[in-house]
Image (cartoon, helix red, strand yellow):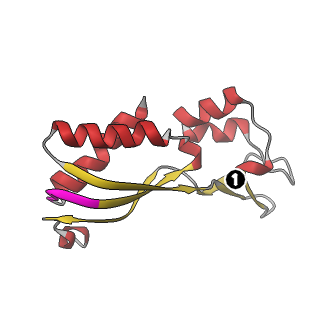
Amino acid sequence: MHEWALASTVLGFLFRELGCRKLEHVVIALGELQNIDWEVFRFALKNIAKTEGLEIKHIEFVRKKAKFYCNRCGHEWTLDDVNLSEEEREAIHFVPEAVHAYVKCPKCGSRDFTVVEGRGVELISFAGEGCNVSALRS
């Protein structure tokens, strides 16, 4: 499950890179293409933090819808505009770049498109003790 690896990376950034000792809250955007199980991710964040003697009081997730732009005809669309099977969604979940193998522009049929939004994990905001936010600027 890549939720555990992602949780470890997020915590490494917050606690090791920024030096946070305790987090009151953290807001994390999860890209639709990642298809992350929110409860597994929350469980992983809490348990990895606890194992390392750290604490996160409140975790909030925001879903970032996948948005695409066709480089051929300029059409913009979302994942809701295409029909994907569960198997195709699962393949994209593990390798988001695979979206180009399963999705094409609904207007012109091209596979030459850009994923504008909806990939990865993004730290939106956080508040806690000992966080060196000046490290974000360097």
In this view, the residue farthest toward the front is: 57
Residue 19 vs 48, above or below: the answer is: below
Q: Is residue 34 left or right of residue 41?
A: right
Q: Would you name the residue on which mark 1 appears?
A: 113
The answer to which quarter of the image holds residue 9 is: top left
Q: Nearer the viewer, residue 138 or 40?
A: 40
Residue 20 quadrant: bottom left
- Which x, y percent locates residue 115? 62, 54
Work out whether 62 lies above or below 91: below
Name the residue at 15% across, 64% down.
129
Residue at image position (33%, 37%) is 44
Q: Name the quarter where the C terminus is drawn.
A: bottom left
Taking 70 as reference, is 135 left or right?
Answer: left
Q: Is residue 105 left or right of residue 100?
A: right
Label 1: element kind: strand
- Mark 1 residue type: Phe
Neighbourhood count class around disc 1 (C-alpha, 10 Å): few under 14, some 14–19, many 20 upward: many
Q: As drawn, which residue projects farthest toward the top?
A: 87
Q: How many marks?
A: 1
- Residue at the image point whose x is 68% and y is 31% from the top: 88
Q: State the residue in front, 1 or 41.
A: 41
Quadrant into which the N terminus falls: top left
- Residue 66 inside the magenta-drawn segment: no
- Report the span colored magenta: 19-24
**Residue 20 counted in the magenta span:** yes
Q: Position of residue 102 (x, y in %)?
A: 72, 36
Q: Is residue 103 left or right of residue 21?
A: right
Work out whether 22 lies above or below 134. Answer: above
Q: Position of residue 3 (x, y in %)?
A: 41, 36
Given residues 65 and 71, the one toward you in this image is: 65
